[in-house]
Amino acid sequence: MAEEEKIFSKQLIGKSVVSKTGKNFGTVGDIVFETHSGELINLVLANPTTYAEKLELEKDRENKTLIPFSAVVAVGDFVVIAEEDII
């Protein structure tokens, strides 16, 4: 069994967030996580696109758009999300 490559949170900041179908949502501005367990909860979008804004996704207290981390399906040059998991 191959060992999974570790990705540090700072490597996600600034990556483009796209759906599996190629729709652009913006870039990762921050990551929300549970401090006790380390569980990743949400990606905070920086510069959300018009498309992302029209979806009326969950917002934080500062009115920043959130993407549930459970919707992330892959991380590479982009953070790929399953759009059906956030709507």
Image (cartoon, rainbow, N blue to C red):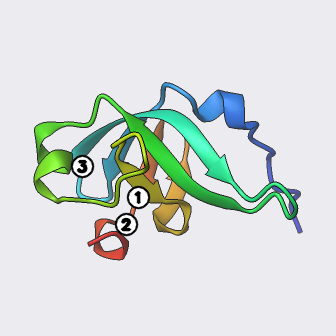
In depth, the one of 49 and 75 nearer the eye is 49
Left or right: where does residue 20 sit relative to residue 41? Answer: left
Name which of mark 3 and mark 2 comes first in the sequence: 3
- Residue 84's x, y, as percent? 29, 74
Q: Residues within 10 Å of mark 3 (few under 14, many from 20)?
A: few
Quadrant of residue 45 within the rendered picture: top left
Q: Real-space Cα distance between discs 2 and 1?
A: 4 Å
Please tell me whether mark 1 or mark 3 is closer to you in this view: 1
Which numbered circle lies on residue 82?
2
Pointer 2 and pointer 1: residues touching (CB < 8 Å)?
A: yes
Q: Amino acid at mark 2?
A: Ala
Distance from disc 1 to disc 3, alpha carbons, whole Å, reads 10 Å
Out of 63 and 80, give the one closest to the viewer.
63
**Against 63, is 47 above or below?**
above
Q: Is residue 3 left or right of residue 16?
A: right
Q: Which is in the foreground here, disc 3 or disc 2?
A: 2
**Three-letter residue code for mark 3:** Gly
Q: Secondary structure at mark 1?
A: strand
Quarter of the image with the C terminus is: bottom left
Q: Residues within 10 Å of mark 2 (few under 14, many from 20)?
A: some
Which residue bears the numbered disc 3? 22
Q: Which residue is under mark 1?
A: 81
Secondary structure at numbered mark 3: loop
Mark 3–mark 2 Cα distance, whole angstroms, equals: 10 Å
Do the residues bearing badges 3 and 2 touch, measured as CB atoms within 8 Å?
no
Residue 52 is situated, as x and y percent measured from the top left of the image, at 20, 48
Residue 10 in the image: state x and y as whole percent.
Answer: 69, 28
Q: Quick check: 47 left or right of 28?
A: left
Q: Residues within 10 Å of mark 1 (few under 14, many from 20)?
A: many
Quick check: marks 1 and 3 in contact, CB under 8 Å? no
